[in-house]
Image (cartoon, helix red, strand yellow):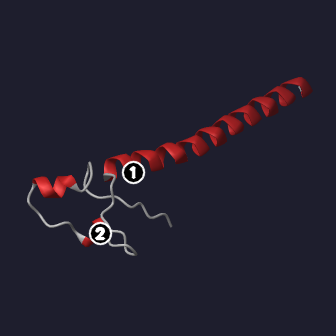
Amino acid sequence: MCIIGCCGADGPNDYLALRKALPTECRDTVTGNAFFYGCADEVTWFLEDKSRWTTNIAISIAALECCVTNVNDVRL
C-alpha cells in the first residue's frame, strides 16, 4: 500500500485561505508537521512514476508480439 502525504489541492494554505482548521490527515503522524505539497502535485508525481513502468511493459509486450508474428510468418 502506498501512502501519499499531502494537504489540500495546492498545499496547507488552501485551508488557511478558507479560515478552516488543518485536518489531522494533513499532518505527519510522527512529527505533527503539516505536509508541504498539495495533493494535486503528489498524485501527479505518483502517477508519473507508475506510468513509466506501464509504458515500458506495454512497449516490451508490443515488441514481443511483433517478434512472435514475424517468426510465425516465416514458418508459413
Question: Spatial distance from mark 2 to mark 1, Cα to Cα?
Answer: 14 Å
> Which quarter of the picture shows residue 75?
top right
Q: Residue at x 81, y 34 (%)?
A: 68
> Which quarter of the picture shows residue 7?
bottom left
The reply, left or right, for residue 50 in relation to residue 39 is: right
Q: Which residue is mark 2?
A: 25
**Three-letter residue code for mark 2:** Glu
Q: Please tell me which residue lies in front, 54 or 26.
A: 26
Label annotation for residue 58: none
62 above or below 24? above
Q: Horizontal and vertical percent for residue 36?
A: 33, 55
Q: Residue furthest left?
A: 19
75 above or below 10? above
56 above or below 70? below
Is the C terminus in the top left, top right, bottom left or bottom right quadrant? top right
Q: Please tell me which residue lies in front, 26 or 66.
A: 26
Q: Please tell me which residue lies in front, 71 or 36.
A: 36
Q: Which residue is mark 1?
A: 42
Q: Residue at x 31, y 68 (%)?
A: 27
